[in-house]
Image: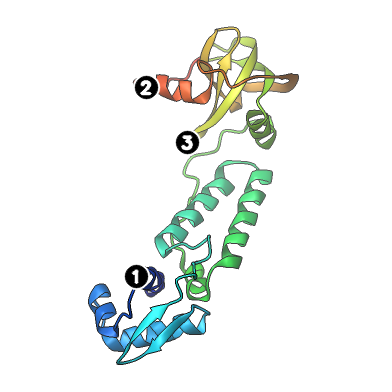
Amino acid sequence: MRRADRLIKIVHFLRSRHQVVTAKRIAEEFNICTRTVYRDIQDLIDSGVPITGEAGVGYVIDKQYYLPPITFDTDELEAIGLGISMVRQWTDERFAAKADNAFEKIKAVLPATLQGEMKQITTYSMSADTPLPWTVSFSDLREYIRTQRKIRIEYIDEKKQNTSRILLPLALLFFSPVWLLVSWCEKRKDFRHFRLDRIRTLQHCEETFEDEQDKNLQAYLSKEAACQIEFND
């Protein structure tokens, strides 16, 4: 276990106890020596954690103390870093900028004991395939999904035929290197997937749509649970 993870777990361990906890008991819980416990406790106190007590007696933490709402262990930070890297690789500049801003906010509120871990992230996303370019705005499309706004697209299907559709956009799915738009298609009266790189034009309609039980994302997910996704149209 990395030291930063252990410090977080020691705080949780102390909060779960109603009586003074000895250094020996903490050492047994985390399979470390008491000397390490003394050093960890002092580092926590120095970082502002309200722990009282002393060596040879034991320690107690103020039960009103809570870790900041955004607190992660090192593996969680690694996963977040990987996610940010993937957003940079596979979306657009606007969404990548939002991801970078979120990451900066996370780093800003991390306790001092975890700041060093941010410099040791070793998991990244690199593009092995050539991304398939699209001309529609990825971020605008996300906004139409969020605001439940109907869209009109001009699309080239697998047979190189042009088609025009009115869609209820529901979600974006990534199948490297392809992005799929999941929609309810008014022409087909069913769920359909549309490759972003095959959408020639996209316009939003003034009309919005309701979250109808048989046409929403949950209905789509329920239907696809027993089926393999195929590119269609």
- Residue 70: give x, y in percent of width and height: 53, 60
Which numbered marker is on residue 93?
none
Name above or below for residue 49 compared with residue 133.
below
Would you say the residues marked 2 and 3 are in contact, meaning their CB atoms lie under 8 Å apart? no
73 on left or right of 34: right
Residue, x 46% and y 75% (percent of image)?
62
Q: Quadrant of the N terminus?
A: bottom left
Give the number of marks. Answer: 3
Q: Nearer the viewer, mark 2 or mark 3?
A: 2
Name the residue that disc number 1 marks: 13
Q: CA distance from mark 3 to mark 1?
A: 42 Å
Would you say the residues marked 1 and 2 are in contact, meaning their CB atoms lie under 8 Å apart? no
Where residue 162 sits, quadrant-wise, is top right
Name the residue that disc number 2 marks: 228
Question: Tag 2: Cα neighbours inside 10 Å, few (<14), some, or many (≥20)?
Answer: few
Disc with the residue nearer the chain's start (3 vs 1): 1
Q: Indicate the amino acid at tag 3.
A: Ser
Question: Tag 3: Cα neighbours inside 10 Å, few (<14), some, or many (≥20)?
Answer: few
Disc with the residue nearer the chain's start (2 vs 3): 3
Name the residue that disc number 3 marks: 176
